[in-house]
Image (tube, rainbow, N blue to C red):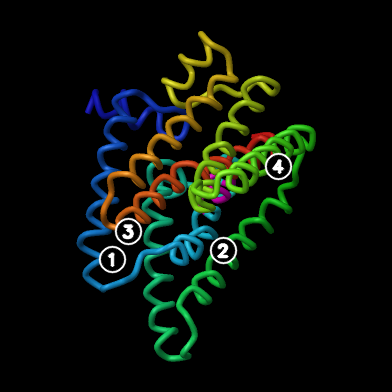
C-alpha cells in the first residue's frame, strides 16, 4: 500500500507523479483500443467526424465538471482524475445507446439526440459556475484572448494549407487551449503545472515552452495517423482520444482560474 499511497492516493486531485502518469497512460491507451475493438466495432457503429462532433459537448462537460470539483461543488473520486474519465465515459456511453435507440424510433439521426443530451449537461454545469461566480475576470479574459488568437492561427493554417484539415486544426486548437490556460495560470496567477514533466520543463525553459511542446507533439501525432493509419474509422477514433487529452483541460483551467480555486 505504501507505493500505491505515495504515487497515486496521496497526490490524487492535486498533482501527478511520473509513475502515475505512466500507469494512467497505459490504462488510457488500453481503454482506447478495447472500446474501439470490443464495443464500437461489435455494435457496428460508424466512427467519423459527425460522431466526433457529437462527443464534443460531453468532453467539455468533463472539463467543466472537473473545475466544479476544484470549487467543491462535486465531491469524491468520480469527479477527480482519473475517476472523472470513468464517470464521463459511462454517461457518454449511456447517452449514445439511448440516442441510437431514439434514432430508430423517431427516424432522426442519433447525433441530434447526442448533441441535445450533451448540451443539457454542459448547461447544467455552467449554471453552477454562474452561481459560484467568476472572481478573476482578468485571468478569464486573458485566457479567452489566447483561445481566440489560437483559433485564428489554426483557422488561417487550414485556409492557407487545405490539406491541414478542419478536424486536425480543431484538435490542435484543443491542445493550444490547454497550453493557454496553463501559461496564464503559472505566469500571472501563481498556479503550478500539475504534470511533473511540464513543471520541470517550465522551470528550466520558462512557461512559454508549453506551447511548442504540446502543439508540436499533437501535430506530429496527427501527421503520423494520417500518413500511416489505413483504417479511416480507427484514425478518427485516435483523433478523438487526442481531443479528450486537450479540450477538457482547457475548459477546466479557464473556469478553475476564473473561479479563483
Which residue is pictured at 66% across the width and 55% down the height?
128
Judge the density around disc 2: few (<14), some (14-19), many (≥20) Cα neighbours within 10 Å.
many
**Residue 72 visible in the shown view:** no
**Residue 251 visible in the shown view:** yes
Q: Gap in Å between the C-alphas at discs 2 and 1?
A: 23 Å
Q: Is residue 182 left or right of residue 200?
A: right
Q: Gap in Å between the C-alphas at discs 2 and 4?
A: 24 Å
Residue in front for this viewpoint, 238 or 155? 155
Q: Which residue is mark 2?
A: 121
Q: Nearer the viewer, mark 3 or mark 1?
A: 3
Q: Are marks 2 and 4 in contact (CB under 8 Å)?
A: no
Q: Are marks 4 and 1 in contact (CB under 8 Å)?
A: no
Task: Tell me residue 66's x, y (percent).
Answer: 53, 45
Whether the magenta-drawn stretch holds residue 65 is answered as yes
Element at label 3: helix
Q: Does residue 208 lie above or below 13 as drawn?
A: above
Whether the magenta-drawn stretch holds residue 31 is answered as no
Q: Are marks 3 and 1 in contact (CB under 8 Å)?
A: no
Q: Which residue is mark 1?
A: 40
Q: Nearer the viewer, mark 4 or mark 3?
A: 3
Q: Gap in Å between the C-alphas at discs 4 and 3?
A: 30 Å
Amino acid at each position: 500500500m505504501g507505493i500505491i499511497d505515495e504515487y497515486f492516493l496521496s497526490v490524487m486531485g492535486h498533482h501527478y507523479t511520473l509513475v502515475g502518469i505512466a500507469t494512467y497512460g497505459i490504462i488510457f491507451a488500453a481503454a482506447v483500443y478495447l472500446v474501439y475493438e470490443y464495443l464500437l466495432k461489435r455494435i457496428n457503429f460508424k466512427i467519423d467526424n459527425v460522431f466526433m462532433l457529437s462527443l464534443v459537448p460531453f468532453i467539455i462537460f468533463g472539463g467543466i465538471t472537473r473545475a466544479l470539483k476544484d470549487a467543491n461543488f462535486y465531491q469524491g473520486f468520480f469527479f477527480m482524475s482519473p475517476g472523472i474519465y470513468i464517470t464521463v465515459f459511462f454517461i457518454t456511453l449511456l447517452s449514445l445507446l439511448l440516442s441510437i435507440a431514439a434514432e430508430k424510433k423517431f427516424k432522426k439521426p442519433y447525433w441530434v439526440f447526442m448533441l441535445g443530451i450533451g448540451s443539457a449537461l454542459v448547461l447544467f454545469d455552467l449554471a453552477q459556475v454562474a452561481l459560484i461566480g467568476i472572481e478573476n475576470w482578468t485571468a478569464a479574459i486573458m485566457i479567452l484572448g489566447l483561445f481566440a488568437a489560437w483559433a485564428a492561427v489554426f483557422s488561417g493554417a487550414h485556409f492557407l494549407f487545405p490539406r491541414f484539415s478542419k478536424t486536425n486544426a480543431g484538435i490542435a486548437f484543443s491542445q493550444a487551449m490547454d497550453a493557454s490556460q496553463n501559461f496564464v495560470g503559472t505566469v500571472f496567477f501563481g498556479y503550478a503545472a500539475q504534470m511533473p514533466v511540464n513543471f520541470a520543463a517550465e522551470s528550466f525553459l520558462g512557461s512559454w515552452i508549453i506551447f511548442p511542446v504540446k502543439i508540436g507533439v499533437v501535430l506530429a501525432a496527427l501527421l503520423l495517423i494520417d500518413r500511416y493509419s489505413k483504417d479511416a474509422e480507427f484514425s478518427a477514433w485516435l483523433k478523438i482520444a487526442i481531443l479528450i487529452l486537450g479540450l477538457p483541460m482547457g475548459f477546466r483551467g479557464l473556469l478553475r482560474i476564473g473561479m479563483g480555486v
